[in-house]
Image (cartoon, rainbow, N blue to C red):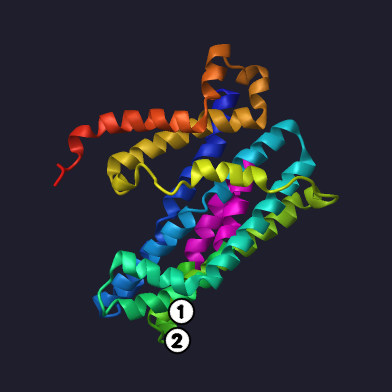
Amino acid sequence: MNIRDRQILQIALPSIVSNITIPLLGMIDVAIVGHMGSPAYIGAVAVGSMIFNLVYWLFGFLRMGSSGLTSQALGRRDLTEIASILARSVFIAFSIALLLILLQIPMKWASFALIGPTEDVVPFASTYFNIVIWGAPAVLGLYSMLGWFIGMQNTRFPMFISIMQNVVNILASLTLVYGFGMKIEGVAMGTVIAQYAGFIVALGLVVRYYGRLFRGGRKGGCEPLFHISRSTSGSRHPLREYRDDATLSVFLLFHGWFCLRWRGPRRKGLWRQKHYRLPRDTAQTLDVDTHRRNGLYLIIYNRWTADRRPPDG
């Protein structure tokens, strides 16, 4: 195994483990409420998780934007800009989280109107929503930090944080539900505790291992992140119709592998070294516009799954 392959594995393997642990937070809540004696609890967690997954997905640019911009700054060895990117991203994350908290009531009832839960689910789902919404600053702030870690070519920290969050969520939810006799409130509070635990640990890792980067002034504005948001959080996701399809999971897995295989090392600047030098035509191909690249992926995916789609009507 050559140097390039080892570096790719060091980035890719922790990312794979982190992505595997993402669905566990919701699964843990469902597993706990499934023993409470009423299907309404399961429905409440399902509705609440659906709302927050949708809302937080809209702000995925905080993670992807931080990752790309940090990788570029790292390739230029611009340490001041590296620190500024994280500071700006976290500031934007907290601002968005504050807005979500202020608008939580209209957002909750608009979501219920769209999803249409049954009458016995609505009170529990409302309770779950009212508690978990207060974890928005931790979730969005953690998005920024995880993207920044990935941009720094450090995927071990996100893997550690993801595993730690699941462990804290299990312990906190079980303690609150079975130790203090709570119901849906205990599950929701366990989720929020895990979210803030992940954010605090991420902040501690930044201070402990990258604190020296934040000594000195800051420069630049927030425009680059919002520019990236237009590409990463569009209002209509072309694949949402098939988001639960197994073939889509495989497709996105190979998409992620491609990004780690080429984009990460190239943005970091390692492609300039001898063992990362690419043919001229290949390098030009890898620099195509994001929308054009995603369009090509969609064409391939649509052709692949054309015979698997349900008939209209």
Q: Is 42 left, or right, of 283 in this rendering?
A: left
Q: Secondary structure at mark 1?
A: helix
Residue underneath mark 2: 180
Q: Which residues are magenta?
A: 139-168
Q: Is 294 left, or right, of 244 in this rendering?
A: right
In the image, is residue 151 part of the stretch drawn in magenta? yes
Residue extending farthest bottom: 181
Residue underneath mark 1: 175
Measuring from the top left, give residue 143's x and y in whole percent.
Answer: 57, 54
Residue drawn at 57 percent across, 66 percent down: 99
Measuring from the top left, give residue 21's x and y in whole percent.
Answer: 44, 54
Examine the rendered structure and indicate whether residue 288 appears above or below residue 164: above
Q: In this view of the protein, which residue sits in the foreground, 6 or 278? A: 278
Residue 209 visible in the picture: yes
Examine the rendered structure and indicate whether residue 91 appears above or below residue 177: above
- For the residue marked with disc 2, what is the amino acid? Phe
Measuring from the top left, give residue 206's x and y in whole percent.
Answer: 70, 54
Q: Is 190 left, or right, of 2 in this rendering?
A: left
